[in-house]
Image: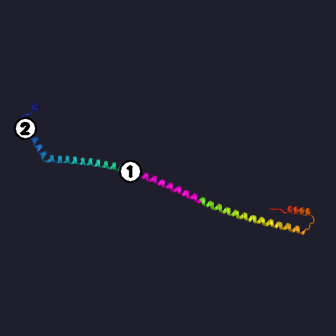
């Protein structure tokens, strides 16, 4: 029955050994354990603060990235707008230059046509004059007494001359 109801001596030695162990723990182990727990608490707190700070920085970076992306899109849109403007300007200038060159070519062609027309008219006038002189020479060479004979002769000569 001693196991169920301990003796007074056993209780005394248990209290003394517990007190000694408690004193030894308090003297040598309690401060390092508390210090280790405090250090652990501080490191956990620091890690949590670092995590919060990192989270805030990530949010800030995300916001900055969105802002940079928006600015890049705006810049891209502006560049495309400027490129379209430059393209339209180049096309417009090319059309104007082509129209000007076409007008110059047309004017040159008109001038050439006019000069060729004048040359052709001069040639026709010269041929008509040559034909007239030939006809006059033939008329003068042949003396005719009657006007009917002259008319018949002139018709005959005109029929003989072929105009090109």
Q: Give how far across and how far down residue 116 sits, in percent.
A: 72, 64
Tag nearer the camera, 2 or 1: 1
| Residue positioned most to the right | 145
Against 115, is 57 above or below?
above
Is residue 35 rendered to the left or right of residue 83? Answer: left
- 10 relative to 51, above or below: above
Q: Which residue is label 1 attached to?
A: 67
Circle 1 — which element?
helix
Towards the viewer: 161 or 137:
137
- Which residue in the rendered view is the most extreme toward the top? 1
Residue ID for mark 2: 12
Instruction: For the C terminus, give its image quadrant.
Output: bottom right
Image quadrant of residue 122? bottom right
Would residue 83 be counted in the magenta stretch?
A: yes
Q: Secondary structure at mark 2?
A: helix
Q: Residue at x 34, y 50 (%)?
A: 60
| Residue displayed at 68% across by 63% down | 111
Q: Nearer the viewer, residue 20 or 74?
A: 74
Going by the image, does 43 lie left or right of 31? right
Residue 97 is labelled as: none
Gap between marks 2 and 1 measured at Cα: 76 Å
Q: Position of residue 76 (x, y in %)?
A: 45, 53
Mark 2 crowd level (few <14, some 14–19, many ≥20, 10 Å Cα)? few
Question: Position of 56 compared to 68: left or right?
Answer: left
Magenta part of the protein: which range? 70-97
């Amino acid at each position: 029955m001693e196991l169920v109801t301990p003796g007074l001596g056993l209780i005394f030695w248990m209290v003394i050994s517990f007190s000694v162990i408690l004193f030894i723990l308090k003297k040598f182990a309690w401060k390092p354990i508390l210090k280790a727990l405090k250090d652990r608490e501080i490191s956990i707190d620091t890690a949590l603060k670092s995590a919060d700070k990192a989270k805030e920085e990530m949010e800030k970076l995300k916001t900055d990235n969105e802002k940079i992306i928006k600015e890049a899109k705006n810049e891209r849109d502006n560049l495309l707008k400027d490129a379209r403007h430059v393209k339209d300007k180049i096309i417009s200038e090319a059309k104007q230059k082509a129209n000007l060159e076409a007008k110059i070519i047309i004017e040159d062609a008109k001038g050439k046509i006019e000069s060729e027309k004048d040359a052709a008219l001069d040639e026709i006038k010269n041929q008509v004059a040559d034909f007239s002189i030939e006809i006059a020479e033939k008329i003068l060479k042949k003396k005719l007494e009657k006007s009917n004979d002259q008319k018949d002769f002139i018709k005959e000569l005109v029929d003989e001359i072929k105009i090109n």
